[in-house]
Image (cartoon, rainbow, N blue to C red):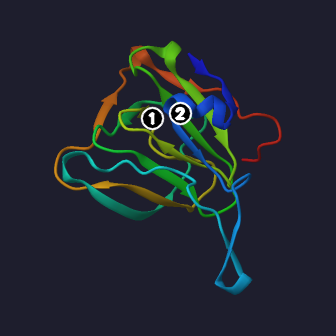
Amino acid sequence: MKIRIEQLTKAAFAPYGEVVEADGAKEIPINQGYAVRRNALGTVDIATNNGDVNISLFVAQPRPMPIAIEVMERHPDGSQLFYPLQDRDWLVVVCDNPHKPDTYRAFLATGRQGVNYARNIWHHPLLVLDTDSRFFIVDRKGPGANLEEVFLDKAQALALDDLPQGVLR
């Protein structure tokens, strides 16, 4: 089964978390007018089980095309926010239930859009289209097992549909 790739929008992604983007956010002048600040772009959820904020940098590589969906993960104790540090398109795959193919959705994000997966939302690990793609990550660290993974067997094999027209690869 192939999963159709749709454009990432706040409305389409709302059941899974937040789209994090500066476009449309209120600008607040700071630093004597030499910078602007855009507040509240996402809500980090880390409070469960004495969690603390973890800030990290990921450098990701593209997977072979067509992209096979073989594993899904979720984080029961907190949200996980990904924000690209380069203006490069990337992919987001989520689902309600990893064993039900009809619940999967795939989104094409621009290099100016991040996502904040809500707690317990099934998602694929980071999917990039360019080598050495860098991401700023804000998530939870602390006690407890904050990662569940489901590996799909061959009978449940899924793949992403072709990239939309105009997306360079």
| Disc number placed over residue 159 in the picture, else none | none
Q: In this view, does 72 lie to the left or right of 84?
A: left
Query: Left of 2 or right of it: where is 68?
Result: left
Q: Which residue is drawn at 33% across and 60% down?
A: 53
Is 139 positioned to the left or the right of 7 in the image?
left
Instruction: Pinpoint residue 115: horizontal percent, then vertical percent.
Output: 55, 46
As helix, strand or loop, the secondary structure at mark 2 comes to: strand
- Mark 1 lies on residue: 123
Residue drawn at x 43%, y 38% is: 118
What residue is shown with label 2? 93
Badge 2: few (under 14), some or many (20 or more) residues near its Cα, within 10 Å?
A: many
Q: Position of residue 100 (x, y in %)?
A: 43, 14
Image-based side of 92 in relation to 31, left or right:
left
Q: Residue at x 51, y 22 (%)?
A: 158
The furthest residue to the left: 143
Task: Look at the picture and state if 134 lies above or below 146.
Answer: below
Toward which corner of the image does residue 48 lie, by quadrant? Answer: top left
- Percent coordinates x, y for residue 73 in the rendering: 36, 35
Which of 43/155 is in front? 43
Label 1 is placed on what type of residue? His
Label 1 – label 2 distance at C-alpha: 6 Å
Please name the residue shown 60% across and 20% down the image: 2
| Mark 1 crowd level (few <14, some 14–19, many ≥20, 10 Å Cα) | many
The amino acid at mark 2 is: Val
Q: Earlier in the sequence, mark 1 or mark 2?
A: 2
Callout 1 secondary element: strand
Q: How many marks?
A: 2
Q: Do the residues labelled 1 and 2 touch (CB within 8 Å)?
A: yes
